[in-house]
Amino acid sequence: MSDDPLGYHSNPRLLAEVERLAAHAPGGRAVLVEAGRTVRGQPIPAVRVSSPGPDRDGRPRVLVSANVHGNEVISSELAMALLADLAASTPTDAAQALLGRVEVVIVPAVNLDSRAAAADALIDGRLFARAPRGNANGVDLNRNFPWVQGGHDPWHPMAGSSIPWMPWYRGPEPLSEPEALALAELAERDRPVVALNLHSVGRLFLYPWNAYAEPPPHLDAFVAIGEAFCASQPGPRYQIKQAQAWYGIMGDMDDWLYERCGTLAMTVELSGAMEAVRERPTALFSPASWMNPVSPGATVRNSHVPCLMALLEGLNQAEARAAAPTPVSLPSPPRAGRCPAPCRRPARRVQAAG
C-alpha cells in the first residue's frame, strides 16, 4: 500500500505526521500527549497547541475530536489540516487569533483501530473492503457516553442499540470503551469551553440537544457559532440545526459535554451523502467511500477556516456567558420512556487537574 501525498493518510502516516507537526511547531507551541489507548492498545494522540506566554496555563481550552467513527476518515483529514495550520510557522489569521486566546486540544483520530481498514481501502481504491463504524469491540463510540438526565430511548436503532451486531451498538454500559473513556477523562480534566466533534456525512452543523426536541438554554449562542462557521465557507454552505431534528441519539458526546461540563459542544457533519458514488459509480461497492469523498481536498478547504471561526465565536459566546451565567438546565418534566439499566450507571469521574 502506498499513500497518495495529496489524499488520505494511512494510520502510520497520520501518526508520524502528528508527531512531526508537534515536534516542529515554533517556540514549543505544541505538546503531544497520549489521551488514552484503543481496544487494541494503540496510543490515542492528542496535541495541545497555544502561543507561548506567561498566561498559557490559565487560558481556556477548546477541544476538537475526529474519527470517533472508524469509517469517517474525512474527519481526521480536517483535524490534521487544523493541526498543521495551528502548528505552522505562519498560521492563518484565524489560527493566530485563536492561539493567543486559548489552548486548542486536537484529537485527530480517536478510533484508530477501525480507521485503519477504512483509510487503506480509500487509499488503494479497494472494493468490498470492510470499513467498520464501531471500535474493535463493535461499539459505536458516539452512543457510549452516559445519557443525559431524563433522556428517553427513541426506540429506533440509529439512536443507539442494545444489540451487539448492530452498527449503532451502544455497548454494555456507558464509557465501557477505552476510546470513549479517554475523551471523557480528557474533558473532565480540561473542561473545554467549546468543542467541535468532526463526523460525516450530511453537510450539517449540529448543536444539542440530541436527546430532546426542546431547544437548549444557549440556543442563541449555538446559532451564532453555526453562522460564523457557515459564513466562512468558500463552497457549499452547511445547514445549521438542532441535532435531534436530524435524528435523535442517546449517549452521544455533545449532549454529555454540554450537560456534564457546560461545554458549547457541536458536531460538524462533513461532505455530502454518497458524494464519492456520484463522482465515481464503482464506489458504490466500496463501503469506505459511502462516508467519504473520493479526495479530501475540497471538503477540507470548505471547512478548515470555518472551524477556526466557529471556535473563535464559541469563545466569544463562552466569555459572554461567563459574564451573565445561564445554567444548562434540562427540559422539565422529563420525557416519557426509560433508560435501559446499563445506562443508569453513573459516569466514571476523574479528579480534576490541579
Image (tube, rainbow, N blue to C red):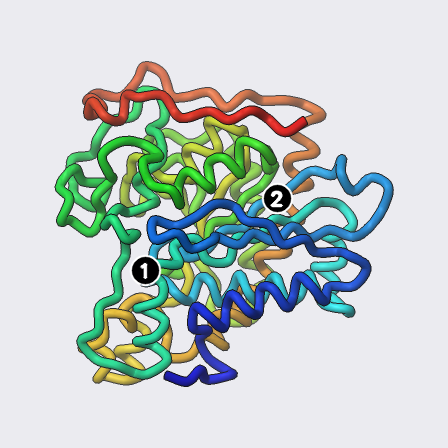
293 to the left or right of 301: left
Q: Position of residue 265 (x, y in %)?
A: 50, 40
**Which residue matches tag 1?**
114
Label 2 CA crowd tier, 10 Å (few <14, some 14–19, many 20+)? many
The residue under the point 25% across, 48% down is 137
The residue under the point 40% across, 45% down is 179
* Position of the N terminus by quadrant: bottom left
The residue under the point 32% across, 60% down is 114
- SS type, badge 2: strand
**Which residue matches tag 2?**
62
Amino acid at dot 2? Val
Label 1 CA crowd tier, 10 Å (few <14, some 14–19, many 20+)? many
Q: Position of residue 133 (x, y in %)?
A: 27, 57
* Position of the C terminus by quadrant: top right
Above or below: residue 267 compared with residue 80: above
In front: label 2 or label 1: 1
Q: Position of residue 343 (x, y in %)?
A: 27, 26
Q: Position of residue 56 (x, y in %)?
A: 78, 42
- Identify the mark nearer the N-term, 2 or 1: 2
Pick out the residue farthest to the front: 41
Residue placed most toward the observer, 301 or 9 = 9
The quarter of the displayed image where residue 17 is located: bottom right
